[in-house]
Amino acid sequence: MSDNLTDKQLKLGYWWILHRATFHRLAVVIIGVIALSFCGYALWQLTDWLTSRQAEEDALRQLVSQNINVDDYRRSSRPVPLEIKLTTAVPSAKNLYDLVAEVKNPNMKWAITNLSFTFTADGVNSQGHAFFLPMEEKYLIKLGVPLQTKPQKIEVTFDGIEWQRIRDLSELNIPSFEISEQEIEHLIPNDYNSPTATKLTFKLNNKNNDSYWQVNLTAILSRFGSIQAVAQKSIVNVISQSQRVVEFYWPNMVISADSVIIKPEVNVLDPRTIK
């Protein structure tokens, strides 16, 4: 390596000797500012913690002192029992009665996939099965139960309930049907020895986007709030955006009614019901 230095190198070295102290002081100032910033931030955090410490301790004491009852919480999250609003027996023929119970599921978040129920009237038991959507109200019915006289007391009991938690009601796609052009006719037979019959006719309009393999229908005829006749039937292959004429027929009965209730229902809890 050559020991000879150029003029440019000598000038640069001379300039560094003159300004080295200045750069040293500048570096000390920059380091000091950074250290002071960290100290200030730490001091601010300490001050904030000290000022909020009392509130945090009070909140912690309150949380620890709370008596959280797990049993109460579990009870509050369980489904509420079904509500029985009405039980009655309706004559359908000689020594035959239709047993009816109006029942509501008051739960918003719980459905019943399978309900086993039993009517008890004058010592006679009649069993059936049903399902309930959240907040659904329907009639549980057993048709043609043999009884000597109209029972004075009717009980309905629930023997087994299979609950299903529903987190989002919109996922069920509960259908809505339109009932129109209801008409009750008294049919006079050709044979004068035969009694007059009663026929209910209406149109069922499926305005839903889904088609259904089966739709269950319940018809209730009442007068002055008293049920006069009940009937049930199922219709199949109910196509979306279609209309169908449906008939209910009560032979050997003359029914006078001022109110007609028609309740279509689809078990959307079972995906197989949707075509």
Image (tube, grey):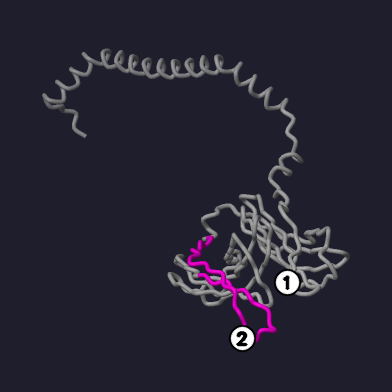
Q: CA distance from mark 1 to mark 2?
A: 22 Å
Residue 197 among those drawn in magenta: yes
**Residue situated in front as seen by the camera: 190 or 160:** 190
At which x and y percent is residue 83?
A: 71, 51
In the image: residue 155, left or right of residue 1: right
Residues rendered magenta in the picture:
174-202
Image disc number at residue 45: none
Asked if the magenta segment contains residue 160, the reply would be: no
Could you tell me which residue is drawn at 59 percent across and 60 percent down?
Answer: 259
Give the left or right position of residue 10, taking residue 128 as reference.
Answer: left
Is 9 positioned to the left or the right of 133 in the image? left
Q: Secondary structure at mark 1?
A: strand
First along the sequence among labels 1 and 2: 1
Position of 10 relative to 171 (above/below): above
Q: Name the outermost residue toward the left.
A: 7
Residue at left offset 47%, top offset 68%: 205
Label drawn at residue 190: 2
Quick check: 23 above or below 224?
above
Q: Are marks 1 and 2 in contact (CB under 8 Å)?
A: no
Residue holding disc 1: 92
Seen from the viewer's position, the closer of residues 44 and 253 is 253
* Residue 211 position in % (x across, y down): 49, 71
**Residue 103 locus on image (x, y percent):** 69, 56
Indicate the amino acid at tag 1.
Answer: Ser
Looking at the rendered image, the quarter that the N terminus falls into is: top left
Is 14 on the left or on the right of 260, as rendered? left
Residue found 62% across the figure and 66% down from its top:
219
Identify residue type, mark 2. Asn
- Residue occupying the far front of the picture: 192
Residue at point 73% right, 25% down? 65
